[in-house]
């Protein structure tokens, strides 16, 4: 082939150990699903061995969205590297910022003002709602419930409007910064979030009306993709997928960060471990998120939103014109960056998909020496072959939807 | 009903063949359901109720490249994905157009590294570049409108 | 250090020759590679570290010995503990024993380790590249691997850079 972008040729020899002997004898069929497939939620490729319509084995092939974020972050200062984090799990951009900032703050030991903590929680929970809405819309679409998709995206717009209001961007906000947040929220913030709090409970009821007792939906989801708690743990599954199998492991509750311990909320758990259980958990999680947002907004303290330590936090722009020192700090932070003590930490937050962890290693300089993202979708996807075995291809689609993978999160 | 009623009892409408063909092409241009990364979510948002791309004859996204006229490259293209993207483009039937949606597809965006193709124009010919990271749905619709203008000015030519 | 860690630290230090330290409130143990499987088996069965969160590595550069540190993050759900285990690995013959016998999710993480760092997990059932294409050259996350930065194209250097770009047949 003459083009530089020709598809690599794959021989049967290379994949021989992945499939059963029956496939080599020609008894079962090997089928390639993806990377361009409407139901793989991105660019996931699955090598399926099918006996008729039944999945014998399923081998996920990932990396089609590998972006080299971990390597690229090593080449930027701590403040600039944060821009990369948004684009990892693009449905949970605020959560990615939060995880990264928690890791950096753990090392530089700055104090975060309570107002910033509360705003972080509100935004992270709004983002969780938005992410669950995308999951709800797309996974319902996969089991042929078209209207839910349209409703879910309608509501998502309201949340994105709030994110845009505070940061100027709909998705890639980079609003949470090491030492606090970018700037204080505008006065309209309170009303905008109250609007969400007022409308959403009714909207979630609407989705439940459409799905929860819908016989077609039940047929497609009940008893499909079962996973026991032991299996889930041995595969490192976290988040709603794990909670659908009966564990109450939620980092917001167990290892509270950003002041989650002040809020009263429940961790929804279902024990069946099938697609429907995961659906129920996520729907109830949306209601719990609303509870957290309401409490945080009611108690939203006044005060500064950034740490006063200008060795790490850029001074406010208003000071640049009047204070020589602020100007020096500003230039130093945005050109050279700040030094972080030598060592390594691991900070984790509960993303909509599970435990989102950052392993951050510093060599004492202004750039991270090594950043590793423990992304939940990577582990949650690995368990897919186990869940899909012996089911139909149509069920596989429902399972992929229920695990809620984001390929940017898997491939990094 | 129809043109005759509005224009009076003329019985005929005169135009050029090119105009008719291009009018037809722009009024039902089916994009391929092909999402890569962050921009794909905004592309979905553009399809959904709030922005509603079906106003422009695009309500139908075809997952099959054989049935689609327009490829919206929504997101960063990794080195592993590049051959697949080219393969998909080759499968599309003429006439076909490409929109590079977002900074990553246009020029690599913030990812200037080993893993990401620095602009999808290395692989497929791009008609319209939409900037933004990710572009707002309005921006995507603006890109589509710009593409329509471009298509309407096209001459009919024999397939190469 | 959490009280619950005392027995774990004692076990790691006495039975497996680990060096345990604390940094920013996190317990980190440096463990020789040959004891990794036995230690993690013990961690899982006796100390209820049911969840292996991640496996990753850090490259300290060609001259350093040991060149790599492979990092394991273990989590105990019942005791709510987190433990970081670091395994030094040589640059010349970079192998670690596979953890797939203890934790199933070590499978993909070790493939990633091989893909990104070229560290072989001995006894791994299916060691292929996972994120990069199969025919990729080199291990991207090693420090001697270039970032692959390309000069951005502007009007003044458009043609110069255009020449270096790969050309498909349009």
Image (cartoon, coloured by chain):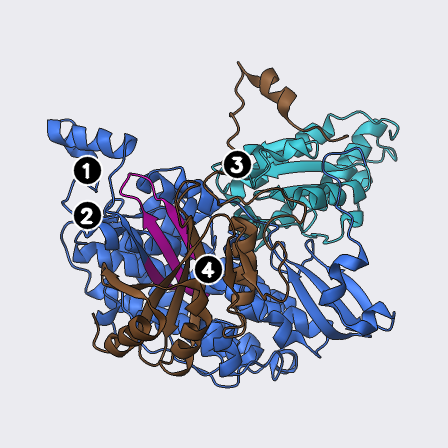
Asked if residue A308 is positioned above or below residue C75 in the image, the reply reads: above
- Whether the magenta-drawn stretch holds residue B63 is answered as no
SS for dot 1:
loop
In the rendered structure, the colour chosen for chain C is brown
| Same subunit, tags 4 and 3 | no
SS for dot 4:
loop
In the rendered structure, the colour chosen for chain A is blue
| Same subunit, tags 2 and 1 | yes
CA gap, disc 2 and disc 3? 31 Å
Q: In front of the other: label 4 or label 3?
A: 4
Q: In front of the other: label 1 or label 4?
A: 4
Residue B6: x percent and y percent? 76, 38
Q: How many marks?
A: 4
Question: Callout 4 environment at 10 Å: few (<14), some (14 to 19), or many (20+)?
Answer: many
| Same subunit, tags 1 and 4 | yes
Residue where numbered disc 1 is placed? A316
- Classify residue B106 as left or right of residue B59: left
Residue A234: x percent and y percent? 50, 76
Q: In front of the other: label 4 or label 2?
A: 4
Residue where numbered disc 4 is placed? A375
């Amino acid at each position: 082939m003459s083009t530089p972008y020709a598809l690599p040729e794959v021989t049967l020899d290379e994949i021989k150990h992945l499939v059963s002997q029956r496939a080599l004898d020609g008894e079962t069929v090997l089928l390639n699903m993806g990377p361009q497939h409407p139901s793989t939620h991105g660019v996931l490729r699955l090598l399926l061995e099918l006996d008729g319509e039944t999945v014998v084995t399923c081998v996920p092939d990932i990396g089609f969205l590998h972006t080299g974020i971990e390597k690229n972050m090593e080449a930027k200062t701590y403040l600039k590297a944060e821009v990369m984090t948004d684009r990892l799990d693009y449905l949970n951009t605020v959560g990615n910022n939060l995880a990264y900032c928690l890791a950096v703050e753990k090392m530089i030991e700055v104090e975060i003002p309570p107002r910033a903590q509360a705003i972080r929680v509100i935004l992270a929970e709004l983002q969780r709602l938005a992410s669950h809405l995308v999951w709800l819309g797309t996974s319902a679409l996969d089991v042929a419930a078209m209207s839910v998709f349209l409703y879910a995206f309608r509501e998502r717009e309201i949340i994105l409007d709030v994110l845009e209001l505070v940061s100027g961007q709909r998705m890639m906000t980079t609003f949470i910064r090491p030492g606090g947040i970018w700037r204080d929220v505008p006065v309209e913030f309170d009303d905008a979030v109250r609007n969400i709090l007022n409308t959403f409970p009714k909207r979630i009821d609407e989705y439940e009306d459409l799905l929860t007792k819908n016989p077609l939906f039940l047929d497609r989801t009940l008893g499909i993709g079962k996973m026991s708690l032991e299996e889930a743990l041995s595969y490192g599954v976290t988040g709603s997928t794990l909670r659908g199998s009966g564990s109450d492991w939620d980092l917001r509750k167990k290892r509270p960060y950003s002041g989650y311990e002040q809020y009263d909320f429940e961790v929804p758990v279902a024990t069946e471990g099938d697609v429907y259980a995961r659906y129920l958990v996520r729907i109830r999680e949306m209601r719990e998120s609303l509870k957290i947002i309401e409490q945080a907004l009611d108690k939203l303290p006044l005060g500064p939103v950034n740490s006063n330590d200008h060795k790490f936090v850029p001074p406010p722009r208003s000071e640049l014109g009047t204070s020589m020192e602020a100007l020096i700090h500003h230039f130093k932070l945005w050109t050279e960056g700040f030094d972080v003590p030598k060592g390594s930490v691991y900070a984790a937050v509960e993303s909509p998909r599970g435990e989102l962890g950052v392993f951050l290693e510093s060599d004492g300089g202004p750039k991270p020496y090594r950043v590793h993202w423990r992304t939940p979708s990577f582990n949650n996807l690995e368990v897919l072959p186990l869940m899909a075995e012996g089911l139909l291809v149509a069920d596989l689609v429902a399972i992929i939807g229920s695990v809620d993978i984001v390929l940017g999160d898997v491939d990094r | 009903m129809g043109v005759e009623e509005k224009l009076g009892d003329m019985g005929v409408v005169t135009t050029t063949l090119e105009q008719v063909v291009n009018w037809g092409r722009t009024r039902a241009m089916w994009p391929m359901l092909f999402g890569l990364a962050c921009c794909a979510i905004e592309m979905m948002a553009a399809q959904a109720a709030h922005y509603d791309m079906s106003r422009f004859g695009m309500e139908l996204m075809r997952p099959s490249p054989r049935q689609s006229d327009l490829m919206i490259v929504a997101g960063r293209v990794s080195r592993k994905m590049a051959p697949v993207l080219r393969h998909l483009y080759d499968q599309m039937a003429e006439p076909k157009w490409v929109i590079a949606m977002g900074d990553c597809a246009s020029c690599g965006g913030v990812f200037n590294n080993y893993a990401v193709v620095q602009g999808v124009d290395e692989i497929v010919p791009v008609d319209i570049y939409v900037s933004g990271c990710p572009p707002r749905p309005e921006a995507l619709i603006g890109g589509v409108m710009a593409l329509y203008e471009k298509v309407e000015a096209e001459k009919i030519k024999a397939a190469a | 250090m959490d009280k619950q860690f005392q027995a774990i630290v004692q076990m790691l230090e006495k039975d497996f020759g680990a060096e345990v330290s604390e940094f920013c409130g996190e317990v980190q143990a440096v463990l020789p590679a040959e004891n990794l499987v036995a230690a993690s088996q013990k961690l899982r069965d006796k100390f209820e570290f049911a969840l292996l969160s991640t496996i990753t590595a850090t490259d300290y550069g060609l001259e350093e010995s040991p060149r790599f540190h492979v990092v394991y993050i273990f989590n105990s759900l019942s005791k709510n503990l987190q433990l970081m285990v670091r395994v030094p690995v040589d640059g010349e013959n970079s192998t670690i024993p596979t953890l797939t016998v203890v934790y199933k999710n070590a499978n993909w993480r070790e493939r990633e380790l091989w893909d990104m760092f070229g560290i072989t997990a001995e006894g791994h059932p299916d060691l292929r590249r996972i994120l990069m294409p199969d025919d990729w050259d080199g291990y991207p996350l090693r420090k001697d691997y270039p970032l692959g930065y390309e000069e951005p194209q502007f009007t003044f250097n458009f043609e110069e850079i255009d020449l270096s770009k790969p050309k498909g047949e349009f």
